[in-house]
Image: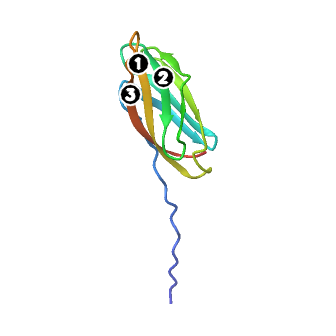
Amino acid sequence: MSRISTIPLRSSTPKASVVNPPFYLNAQNAQTTGITLELKNNGGETYTVQNVSIGGTCAASNDTIGNVAAGATVAVVVPCSPGSSGDTFKGDITITYRKQGSSVDLTSTGSMTEPIA
């Protein structure tokens, strides 16, 4: 008589993070102490980033970014508690920015799915 045993498969959530133009998500990281995003300005002009907010279990923002030149990248740290190490963080990203010399807020949105380190 043969014996059949089953081995439980570990479910893996794929990384999937994106933001809409004019920004590009160059890199991202979720840690138990917060979310780090490396944003690239893919637009043809300098933008003033007013705020980057993260939804989901993080539910926090960073409003100290400032000017990002065309083609430049900036690392944005959003301190929060997105979950435990080994969990998967899922949340929305909202970037509020302005064109140089403008007082009108524009938004770029996206989402992030990332294992928490």
Q: Earlier in the sequence, mark 1 or mark 2?
A: 2
- Amino acid on which disc 3 is placed: Thr
Cα gap from disc 3 to disc 1, whole angstroms? 9 Å
- Image coordinates of residue 68 in percent, x first then y, are 47, 17
- Residue at the spot of label 3: 107
Task: Choose the circle earlier in sequence order: 3 or 2.
Answer: 2
Q: Is residue 117 left or right of residue 24?
A: right
Q: What label does residue 98 carry, if any?
A: 1
Residue type (three-letter) at the residue carrying disc 1: Arg
- The structure residue drawn at horizontal position 52% and vertical position 18%, both measured from the top left corner, is 66
Q: Nearer the viewer, residue 19 or 93?
A: 93
Neighbourhood count class around disc 1 (C-alpha, 10 Å): few under 14, some 14–19, many 20 upward = some
Q: State the SS at label 2.
A: strand
Q: Residue furthest bottom?
A: 1
Mark 3, Cα crowd under 10 Å, few <14 / some 14-19 / many 20+, is some
Q: Label 2 near label 1: C-beta < 8 Å?
A: yes
Q: CA distance from mark 1 to mark 2?
A: 7 Å
Q: Secondary structure at mark 1?
A: strand
Give residue 20's quadrant in the image: top left
Q: How many marks?
A: 3
Tell me what residue is drawn at x 47 percent, y 52 percent: 13
Give the answer, above or below, for where 45 lies relative to 74.
Answer: above
Distance between mark 3 and mark 2 Cα atoms: 10 Å
Q: Are marks 3 and 1 in contact (CB under 8 Å)?
A: no
Q: Quick one: quadrant of the C terminus?
A: top right
Amino acid on which the number 2 mark rests in the picture = Gln
| Camera-side residue of 55 and 17 | 55
Q: Quadrant of residue 16?
A: top left
- Above or below, comparing residue 84 to residue 1 in the picture: above
The residue that disc 2 covers is 50
Percent of width and height locating residue 8: 52, 68
